[in-house]
Amino acid sequence: MSRLRNVLGWLTVAGLFTSQLWLFKDFSIDDAFITFRYVRQFVAGNGLVFNIGERVEGYSNFLWVMLLSPAAVLSMDLLLAARVLSVALSVGTLLLTYRLASTSPALTLAPIMLAAYAPFAAWTMGGLETSLFAFLATAGAYAFIREEERGHGAASGLLFGLLALARPEGILFFGLAVIFRPRRLWVSRAAATPEGRAGKAHTSSRVGWCPSRQDVLRLIGFGALFIPHLLWRLSYYGQPLPNTVYAKAMGLHPRTFIEGGYYLFNGAVALGGLGFLIIPITLVVLKRRTLRHDFLLACVAAYALFIFAGGGDWMPMQRFWVHVAPLLFALAHTGLMALAALIWPPRPILVGIGLALAQVAFLYLGALDAHFVQGVGRAEATQGPTMVDYLRERWRPGDVLAVTDAGGLAYVLPLEARVVDMFGLTDAHIAHRKPEFPSGLFGHGDGFGKWDVDYVLAQNPRFIQVHVIAKAADGTFIVDNTSNRLLMNDLRFKARYRQVADTPELQGLFERIQ
């Protein structure tokens, strides 16, 4: 019966995951093409740059750039290569989620829930490093837990090192491991003393901790990857963090925490809300605390704090939640089983399976809503020439393009083309501006709060791409962010630029009047 249940469980995982890959087969994000342009520049011998001669780290996924570079050498389509690699990584993550849930019955329920979670499949197809980060975070956490349970091994140091190269915040997980280990040894040694067993206070001299060979090897493994890359970044780019971090940093403005809290709330609702996420994980905290669960809870809590302090993310489909979703579902699986034991002690497995399947139904309905109602992952029909077509036909050497969306348009242009990112992801000047929020504490459309109209116009771009929603009756343009509104209301812009066409495909492209 156990083997049959396992087979049926994995068939369910495969069915849910492949069906969602089909639902979101056309989902991609413009920022992925920023990475792809860096890959193309690197393979062409121009260095890790967006514009030739400008050393700006406009990507936050060094390891992903390196992994995609062989595909560029082979002249493969980089979006296709990213998707193939992401599928392989996501399959690995599903398997690791199964291993993380190994202390509870009906193990396949954890990967089943993950496979039903729409953002997991959507971001497998999105082109960014999301699947890589989720895989390495899960692998690092699992390796560290197993090393602590067995008392030997140090592979987690290497995995956390790779995680820090996948995205800068990956260092959080290694930091937690460094903190977690002495704390655990402190508690376990305290419990082993007569005073600890009697519930009495103990002195630090009895339960002190000094690094073991295992700890040293972990530090060496992490440092061997992280430190050389950090030194290279400082020497090549002159900054300790990617330019994207500076571009998106909104400081300690209250708006940051409001947006971060809202992002956390929406993500928690999409993951199952009170019934399928909060209550089960609360039961884990109260009833099923083990080394494994403590570390997973610490990882999720630390990453949630990072999201809150960073202001969340503008991209659809809860990208940041995907990074820790495998850990969350491993915890939720344990919590649902604990809840099942409270509901019907004689048959907890049956109740647990029922609760998990209800969670799966909830998650899959979310996937159907995202695709069929919200339109996520649906290919957009075009009726005429696109911006890509227009730029390819008219581009001349020496032209400059200023963009709101820095990825797709820059990717199709020649590598020598200079592209000015008006949101600052690939532009150091704008990235280091002081953030502004003219639309107020609860306003919308300010982006990261950084722009510089004077700077953009001083680059004398031949083309400027903005987000135009519509054209009002008085001839003014309705746009969706403060940066574009300030630019388009500038008298210099009005005098020097014209809209190339008012079709939906071209309404956001403006060309300098010769």
Image: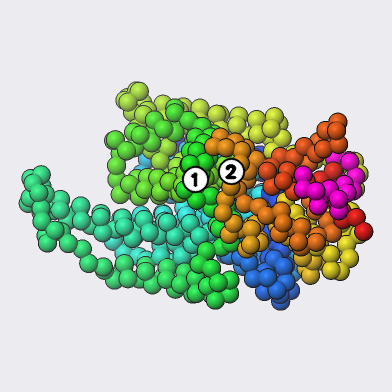
Q: In which quadrant of the rendered view does residue 116 lie?
A: top right
Q: Which mark is residue 437?
A: 2
Identify which residue, 214 or 166, lies in the foreground.
Answer: 166
Q: Residues within 10 Å of mark 1 (few under 14, many from 20)?
A: some
Identify which residue, 110 or 272, lies in the foreground.
Answer: 272
* Residue appearing at x 84%, y 59% in the figure: 462
| Rendered view: 316 above or below 216 | above
Q: Left or right: 305 with respect to 454?
A: left
| Rendered view: 54 above or below 202 | below
Q: Is residue 215 visible?
A: yes
Identify which residue, 184 or 401, lies in the foreground.
Answer: 401
Which of marks 2 and 1 precedes in the sequence?
Answer: 1
Q: Is residue 32 visible?
A: no
Give the residue type at disc 2: Phe
Horizontal and vertical percent position of residue 244: 59, 58
Q: Left or right: 63 with respect to 377?
A: left
Q: Which mark is residue 253?
A: 1
* Residue appearing at x 58%, y 65% in the figure: 62
* Residue appearing at x 69%, y 32% in the figure: 374
Horizontal and vertical percent position of residue 469: 78, 37
Q: Which residues are magenta?
A: 489-506
Q: How many marks on residues?
A: 2
* Residue appearing at x 72%, y 46% in the figure: 486
505 is within the stretch colored magenta: yes
| Rendered view: 105 above or below 73 | above
Disc 1 + disc 2, Cβ < 8 Å: yes
Q: In which quadrant of the rendered view does residue 198 lie?
A: top left
Horizontal and vertical percent position of residue 275: 44, 27
| Identity of the residue furthest to the front in this view | 491
503 is within the stretch colored magenta: yes
Which secondary structure, mark 2?
loop
Give the residue type at disc 1: His
